[in-house]
Amino acid sequence: MTIRPGSLTFLIVAITAFGTPGFSCAQPAPKHVFVYIDTVMAADTQEGVDPRVKPMLPKLRGLFSFTTYSMINSQEGDTECGKMIAFTIPGGKILHVQPRAVDGDMIAMEIVLFDGTRPMMTTDLKLKNGGTLIVGGPRYEQGMMFMSIGASTGPRPLTPAEVTSPANSPVTSPAAETH
C-alpha cells in the first residue's frame, strides 16, 4: 500500500484474505468480476445500528468500538479483468477498482481512492473470491466513514444492504462507470 504525503491516514483491514500483487490478466477465465461497495458511517452517538448493516456487524465490532452504524450508500457494478470501474463515494470521494487477475479463488486488484481529483490512497491486493475488504477513514467529529469493498467472479453475492432489504433487492444502486 502506498499512502501519499499529505493524505488522510487510512486503516485497511482484510476481512477474508489478501496478499501481495504480482500477476497480470493472462488467465482465460473468468473475466467478469462483480464489485460491490457499501459505505457506512460509524459514530459514538448511541443511535443504534441500521438494519442494513447488521449482516456485517460481527466483523465491524471486531474492528471498531463505535455505538452507531448507518449505511449511507450501496453500489455495485460488473467489470472485466483489466478494466477499471469507478464508484462515487459520499463526501466528494471517488473509488476506482481495477481487477487485474484471477488466480484460483483469489482476485488481484488495484484500488485508488480520490478526494476530488487528488489521489488519497493507492493499493494493490489479492482478495479472496467473494471476500470483503474494509477501508476505514476519514474521521469525523464523532466517528468515521468506511467502505466495505467486495468482489466475486461467480454468481453475484448479496451485499449486506440486500440481505436485510425486502425481496433481496438493492437499497440503492447508482450506476457505476466502467472505463
Image (spheres, rainbow, N blue to C red):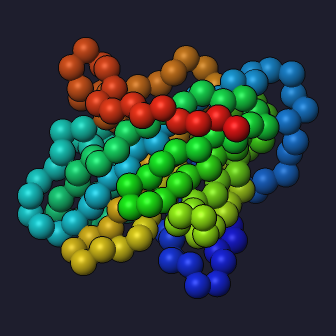
Q: Residue furthest bottom?
A: 6
Q: Is residue 66 above or below residue 109?
A: below
Q: Is residue 121 above or below residue 7?
A: above
| Total tally of numbered discs in the picture | 0
In the picture, measured across the screen, residue 136 lies left or right of residue 60, that is: right
Look at 80% across and 20% down and name the residue there: 29
Is residue 107 in view from this perspective?
A: no
Q: Residue furthest left?
A: 47
Q: Residue furthest front?
A: 117
Is residue 7 in view from this perspective?
A: yes
Q: Quadrant of the N terminus?
A: bottom right
Looking at this view, is 101 or 139 the one in front?
139
In the picture, measured across the screen, residue 58 lies left or right of residue 68, that is: right
Look at 64% across and 74% down and name the residue there: 3
Look at 18% across and 59% down and name the residue there: 68
**Where's residue 61, x and y in %?**
29, 57
Look at 32% across and 68% down and name the residue there: 144
**Where's residue 141, x and y in %?**
24, 78
